[in-house]
Amino acid sequence: MIIEHIMKRNVITLTETSTIKEAMQLLELHEFRHIPIVNESNKLVGIVSDNDIRDASPSIFHFTDHLDDFLKPISSIMKQNVITAHPLDFVEEVSTLFYEHHIGCLPILDDDELVGIVTETDMLHTLVELMGAHQPSSHIEVKVENITGKLSDIAAIFKELNMNITSVLVYPHQDPAYKILVFRVQTIDPRKVVKVIEEKGYEVIWPSEPRIV
């Protein structure tokens, strides 16, 4: 899946000369957390978050003493070195940007022009859908040797039982000679397939026998 499929296209923006007060009003009205800042050519020049606004706001104990602060241009508090993505970037690759940089949103640029935006909430919902976790299903983890063909071998077991696989993840085991295959399958009771997998000599990490009785 590419970012173009999940990004919001109707992006609400402000310009560098917009005031902090205008940004506050937009955030309150639309209940979002980030506003991209663009120039007259719709080129991204910065971004402002609700945290930036909060940090720039005067203390509630001296609120009326600094009303002029709200009339300052948004450029005075915006972040300029903005991490961005392209519409054709893969969702999996973009998710690593959120993870590595601890950001809350990602402007999407095409030829340097702002064409969309993706938030951490959008990414979370998309990853849940990609994993099939939003559908009635069961989670099964199988420890296998870290050699070619093991994923196909386990998948064949599900096929034999006429059981549909919703998603598959692979992650390393603490012993590099092994890996963990994580399947989400369309069944509420996984006991039958777990039994067959174990009968074929594989170790099922989850669900373990005491937990599926």
Image (cartoon, rainbow, N blue to C red):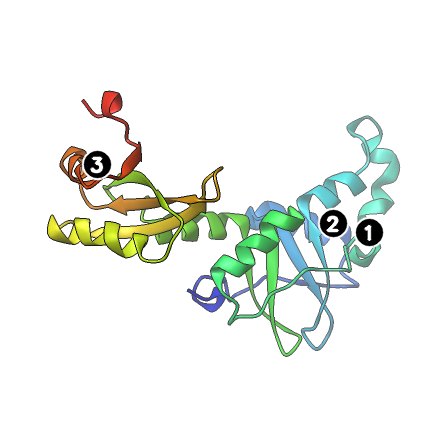
Q: Are marks 2 and 1 in contact (CB under 8 Å)?
A: yes
Q: Closer to the N terminus: mark 2 or mark 1? A: 2
Mark 2 sits on what residue? 21
Give whichever of discs 2 and 3 has the lower sequence position: 2
Q: Is residue 141 above or below residue 85?
A: above
Q: CA distance from mark 3 to mark 1?
A: 68 Å
Question: Which numbered marker is on residue 71?
Answer: 1
SS under mark 3: helix
Task: Give the image location of residue 22, x and y in percent.
Answer: 71, 53
Separation of residues labelled 2 and 1 (CA atoms):
6 Å
Q: Amino acid at mark 1?
A: Leu
Which label was assigned to residue 205?
none
The kind of residue tagged 2 is Lys
The residue pinned by badge 3 equals 198
Pointer 2 local density, CA inside 10 Å: few below 14, some 14–19, many at least 20: some
Looking at the image, tell me whether mark 3 or mark 1 is earlier in sequence order. Answer: 1
Judging depth in this view, the residue of 169 and 12 nearest the camera is 169
| Residue found 55% across the figure and 46% down from its top | 31
* Residue 161 percent location from the top left of the image: 11, 48
Relative placement, left or right, of 25 versus 31 is: right
**Foreground of the two, 29 or 184:** 184
In this picture, is 127 found above or below 46?
above
- Tell me the quarter of the image containing the C terminus: top left
Residue at the image point whose x is 29% and y is 35% from the top:
203
Residue 115 located left or right of residue 167: right
Instruction: Point out the frontmost of discs 2 and 3.
Output: 3
Quadrant for residue 58, please give it: top right
